[in-house]
Image: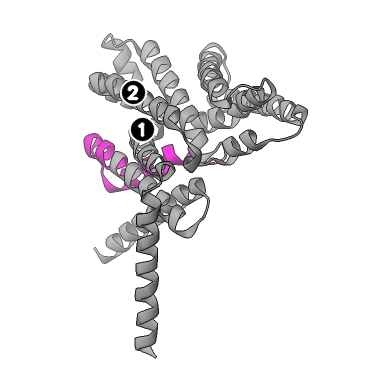
Amino acid sequence: MDFFNNCQIAWLAIANGNNLVSLLEYPFMQRAMVEAVLMGILGGMLGSFVTLRQLSFFSHAVGHAALVGVALGVLLQVNPTWMLLPFTLIFGVVVLYFIDKTDLGSDSVLSIVLSGALAIGLILTSLIKGYRGNLMQVLFGDILALDTTDLILTLLVLVGGSIFLLSTLQQQILLTLNPDVAQVQGIPVQLYRYAFVVLLSLAVAVAIKAVGVLLVNAFLVIPASTAKLMSHHFSGFLVISVIVGSTTSLTGIIVSGLLSIASGPSIVLVQFLLFLAVVIWFKLTLKAA
């Protein structure tokens, strides 16, 4: 009986391996894996700053408000991606401006603007007649449906973001840890804040098509939060966050292809399971000590 069960397990492993090899021959799977790595690196890098600067709700708001841009694209019969990019960019900058110019807390401003944007998005969505495939795809994500243009956009955001953040890394770290000291030392705090929000908004926009509006915040927050548990030094934290983001995204794509399940949720689930494993590991390690 044990021999029979072992044979079944071996056969399933071989079958899954063959399926994976077959999947890798398709261009859409190759594009998805490249996008997963690029997106994971981008999410891990930006997520490090997002978590430390407590901007998780900001990226969440930008992602959900993107529904307006998607609905406008469908209504105007324009590729939703081209409406999504400028809308998320404008939304992110406007929200930061409102936070700076009002006496309200950032969470209050984000809640108000997000509610208004969602209301507009839902109204626009109700006006869409007939086929809503593009809308559903952006809402729930489908990394397997990405084309070369999507890869180029992600690569451009990643390269631009890497140049900006790495060339100003010391200033960014100081701005993250103590904005007042950064201001005193002559660092253009406002310029860097707005530049980071622009970068974050663009990253959310290019990731939405892959993981969807509903899960886009996860690819920024979960890898960085996992890395934060594993390292208390910023350089190590940043590197681990990038590694976790890229490897879990790639693993999620492979799991998605092998099990024929949705790609976006598969990526986020892998990230979530790794986060749980790290939390449990550290809890057990502390108890053992």
Residue in front for this viewpoint, 201 or 227: 201
Identify the magenta region. Answer: 215-241
Q: Residue 72 location in percent, x, y?
A: 66, 22
Q: In the rendered view of the protein, which quadrant contains the N terminus?
A: bottom left
Tell me, yes or no, whether the highlighted magenta stretch contains residue 10: no
Q: Residue at x 54, y 31 (%)?
A: 63
> Quick one: label 1, few (<14), some, or many (20+) residues within 10 Å?
many
Dominant SS of magenta comes to helix
Q: Residue at x 36, y 88 (%)?
A: 2
Task: Determine the CA span between mark 1 and mark 2.
Answer: 8 Å
Q: Residues within 10 Å of mark 2 (few under 14, many from 20)?
A: many
Q: Name the residue beneath numbered marker 1.
A: 42
- Relative image position of residue 244 (x, y in whole percent): 32, 45
Looking at the picture, does residue 30 appear above or below residue 179?
Answer: below
Percent of width and height locating residue 13: 36, 69
x then y, percent, for residue 268: 46, 48
Position of the C terminus, as image quadrant, is bottom left
Which image quarter: residue 237?
top left
Residue 220 lies in the magenta-colored region: yes
Q: Which mark is residue 66?
A: none
Q: Is residue 175 in view? A: no
Q: Given the image, on which type of amino acid does mark 2 rest? A: Gly
Give the residue at x 44% y 42%.
Answer: 28
Return the residue at label 2: 161
* Residue 10 or residue 184, whichever sits in front: 10
